[in-house]
Amino acid sequence: MRQAAGSEQQTIVSSENSSDDGQDDGQQVWDVVVVGAGPAGASAAYAAAVAGRRVLLLEKAELPRYKTCGGGIIGPTRDALPPGFELPFRDRVHAVTFSLEGKFTRTRRSKQMLFGLINRPEFDQQLVEHAQKAGAELRTGATVSRVEQHGSAVPDRRSVAVVLQDGETLLARAVVGADGSASRIGAHVGVKLDQVDLGLEAEIPVPETVAEDWKGRVLIDWGPLPGSYGWVFPKGDTLTVGVISARGEGAATKRYLEDFIARLGLAGFEPSISSGHLTRCRADDSPLSRGRVLVCGDAAGLLEPWTREGISFALRSGRLAGEWAVRIAEAHDAVDTRRQALNYAFAIKAGLGVEMSIGRRMLTIFERRPGVFHAALTGFRPAWKAFAGITRGSTSLGDMVRSHPMAERALSRIDR
Ligand SMILES: Cc1cc2nc3c(=O)[nH]c(=O)nc-3n(C[C@H](O)[C@H](O)[C@H](O)COP(=O)(O)OP(=O)(O)OC[C@H]3O[C@@H](n4cnc5c(N)ncnc54)[C@H](O)[C@@H]3O)c2cc1C
């Protein structure tokens, strides 16, 4: 591991077990410990490591690990990748077929690529390797049980104790919680949620003729449950087929996926993986830190509420968390720590927070009138162009509402 300039190799010696020369029993203190090696954690570890700090990335699974996810990579995700990162695309999307509960099907095409599709195990591992190249140390098979900021495990007020499931305790100047939607670090911070959804997915290997039919084209189906939708994302010889809907409708969501797969003529193919995962959106007033602990990505409830796109949110919030964790690691007192944590919250709210609030409005409208969305995207060219621009990253929902008073008026009118 690289020991970069400006990094302090620190040793804490507790008063009970220090030897006379004060050296042998010392425990290493990391500048930044990151919990969870998904896109948020890898991005945080990368940002703190390129700043020259001693960074430890803890992951409970062995890598590469599977993650229930469509693997859709839109423009903002691409733009948030670390320099030199080569996206391992499994397909490039040039056409979208839209349907409304399986009816009124229409395909829209684009000469330019709209977005790309990756397999998460491969993509996530590559991100972690980037963080390692920047100097972060990785430990897999390390499940974090809790963090402590007071008490006997914490030798001084500048340290956080990270307690692993096997009882081992690690020390850090700052901790980034990037441990996904069932986050333990999020619970420590007190993350409050506004919206929780259940996503169900099947990875379906298909014969070459079927794969050829889907190549370069995705399907998006506006579903039967309020705010639900389904997708087919082709990745070479495998189709990722999934649906998402509000949590609490588990049986109906499962039925939607089964019907969706049957309707597409894919029921005869055995999925290689069937899985489910929750997505969570933070409440507006939810904390993003507590003391020397920051949260990012799904752990913080940072996700686009309408599409439930979360990889760009994870990468962007992870990078900010890594940068601010570096400053917190350097903070010498509670006032400075608080100031840096507030700056992190401000950066998140000014960017991703604004995008989330527009996404929330879109979801409310979509829940009430999925047919209007479908009609607009399939029959109204400016709506399709806006969709294409957003997926490519040449514009965002926020930019559109800000720069087109008509879009704001249209949203407000439909809101009413
Ligand atoms: C069905 C579905 C489809 C989706 N499709 C898309 C899509 O197409 N495009 C998109 O942009 N987003 C999509 N998302 C959202 C996206 O998957 C998430 O927002 C994204 O994975 C968040 O990244 P993360 O790094 O915050 O969390 P994760 O990717 O969940 O990573 C968290 C990591 O923390 C580890 N971990 C957890 N607990 C501990 C612990 N206690 N100790 C140590 N390690 C721990 C986990 O093993 C995991 O590796 C989808 C979500 C779902 C559910």
Image (cartoon, rainbow, N blue to C red):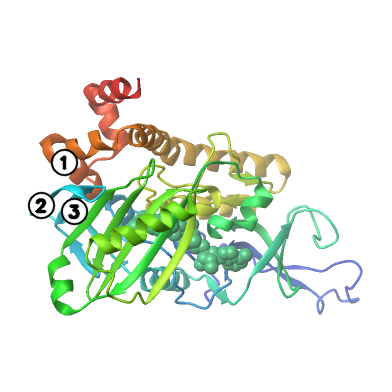
Foreground residue among 406 and 161: 406
Depth order, front residue of 335/151? 151
Residue highlighted by disc 2 = 110
Coordinates of residue 307 in the picture (x, y in percent): 35, 46
Residue that mark 1 sits on:
384
Numbered label attached to residue 137:
none
Quarter assignment of residue 35: bottom right
Q: Amino acid at mark 2?
A: Ser
Q: Is residue 401 left or right of residue 166?
A: left
Which residue is outermost to the left?
111
Look at the picture and state if 288 lies above or below 47: above
Q: Which residue is mark 3?
A: 114
If you read the primary sequence from the N terminus, does the residue marked by circle 1 or circle 2 appear first? 2
Three-letter residue code for mark 1: Trp
Q: Is residue 360 or residue 112 the one in the foreground?
A: 360
In this rendering, is residue 339 above or below 85? above
Q: CA distance from mark 1 to mark 2?
A: 10 Å
Residue 411 visible from this viewpoint: yes
Between 413 and 394, the residue placed more toward the observer is 413
Which structural element holds mark 3? loop
Query: At x 36% / y 69%, what residue is drawn?
Result: 123
Q: Amino acid at mark 3?
A: Leu
How far apart are labels 1 and 3 at the CA level?
Answer: 11 Å
